[in-house]
Amino acid sequence: MAELTAQDIAQRLLADRLQHSSPAVQGLTDPIADTPMTVTLEQLRPYELNPRTTRNPRYDEIKASIRERGLDAPPPITRRPGSAHYIVRNGGNTRLAILGELWSETREERFYRITCLFRPWTTRGEIVALTGHLAENELHGSLSFIERAVGIQKAHELYEQEGGRSLTQRELARRLTTDGFPVSHSQISRMQDAIEHLLPAIPSALYAGLGRPQIVRLLALRSTAEGVWTRQRLTKPVTTEFPDLFQEVLAPFDGDPETFRVDRVRDELIGQMSRQLEIPHLALAVEFGGADWRDPLARDPEGERAPQIKVPPVSPIAKPLSGQAAGSLQSHAAHAPSNVTLGTGLRATPASAPGNTPDRTSRIHSPPPLETRQQPADPTLDDGDSLRGQISQLAQEIAQESEADDSSAAAVRVLLDALSASLTRLSDASLCRLLKMIELARQLRELESDDPDG
């Protein structure tokens, strides 16, 4: 071991004196200005209110670096008045844990005794420490959405204790920005909603890193569903409260964030609401509205663009379908809201079109008549083979959703099974494919009826 210098000896004597002195004496001997100080692992403790509660994803990488190079950036430390131990002032809890492991593994002095910058405790010490840890973790992008949200909630409590009054979200945003952690009041609002509505049901998924895009979509889904529930229960003998219903639906999805799908939560939520309100599943799905209904494949759970259904627009055909197919299509079109796009280039048949007289009692809030819009014919689908190929492709995609083999026979079986169950077993994406199939079938029928050789 290298020869100790006079400064090292003085630091050791000071450390031993602090460790064995009374809390009152310890509080008096701390420097009153920023001062470099050598402390041991026994004298140093992690910050108790650190917003990070899960293992740093770069833990092994940081440990390897410290093992090879030593601690390049010792964390700043401080101490509460009267406390027996120093604490990490902002950031550095991961480094402190790694030093403890390396000391246990190697017994090398460089991992046990470290020189840090001591910064005196102030009257705002708790808030300064918490916002410092938030800012440090934010700088390295290492906090999950829910960890950041819980940290800000704790800061909110400290600010209210400091001022002796409650704070609005805008005031909280201003305080945090002033203390070095800029955040908008709208972000704070989403974070508080996530803590209140999502954290009790899916804590594992959230702390495992469920991303902001999925959380935002979940909160939007909940808001929409609550509005539909509130309107519909006015005329229904339902005793269940919506917060309880939402928690019950969401809880089974707690798990790996990599497999979490908001659209599955949406389907299950609509299903539960459909049973309790005694409203058809498809009718509720239409009332939910929004981008998820108009274009269910538009975005994946991470908010990125997903592949669109490659179906070109087709023009409406004057001749209606006969029998059960026409009746089923007219029945569901009666519930469609204005200007709803049912997949790429497909629009719902207007409920007010000639020959359609839907029962007004089956409508939801009597939506205005759908806009009648002619779509240009696609020259690539002007023959029977092209149309049949497109119809077969859509049928196979519906079959694949049900994990059936992708033969045409299997596709037809899945399709007939879904139709016999009043469409309740189809996802929104497959429902769009089904309606597109019907439109293409009408075009094929029209084409073949006009063909003298057909």
Image (tube, rainbow, N blue to C red):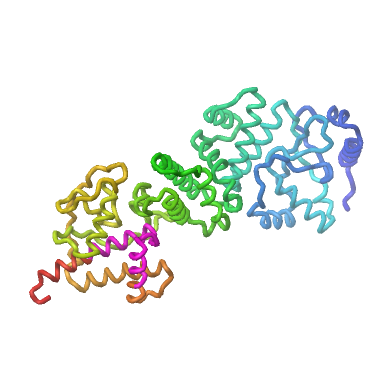
* Residue 414, horizontal then vertical, whole percent: 37, 70
**Which quadrant, please, contains the C terminus?**
bottom left
Would residue 172 appear left or right of 323 to someone viewing this image?
right
Asked which quadrant contains residue 46, the reply is top right
In the orientation shown, which residue stands out farthest toward the front?
A: 237
Q: Is residue 430 magenta?
A: yes
In this rendering, the answer to whether 78 lies above or below 141 is above
* Residue 98, horizontal then vertical, whole percent: 74, 52
Of 387 and 254, which appears nearest the observer?
254
Question: Residues in magenta?
Answer: 413-440
In this rendering, the answer to whether 361 lies above or below 324 is above
In the orientation shown, which residue stands out farthest toward the top?
A: 164
Q: Is residue 302 visible?
A: no
Asked which quadrant contains residue 382, the reply is bottom left
Would residue 415 appear left or right of 223 to someone viewing this image?
left
Q: How many marks?
A: 0
Of 2 and 218, which appears nearest the observer?
218
Is most of the magenta stretch helix, strand or loop?
helix
Residue at position x 21%, y 47% in the image: 371
Residue at position x 25%, y 58% in the image: 329
* Residue 145, horizontal then vertical, whole percent: 56, 45
Q: Is residue 337 magenta?
A: no
Residue at position x 18%, y 68% in the image: 444
Of 435 and 21, which appears nearest the observer?
435
Of 317 and 165, which appears nearest the observer?
317
Would residue 343 appear left or right of 11 to someone viewing this image?
left
Q: Is residue 138 visible?
A: yes
In this rendering, the answer to whether 317 lies above or below 191 is below
* Residue 220, horizontal then vertical, whole percent: 45, 44
Residue at position x 73%, y 57% in the image: 68
Asked which quadrant contains residue 317, the reply is bottom left
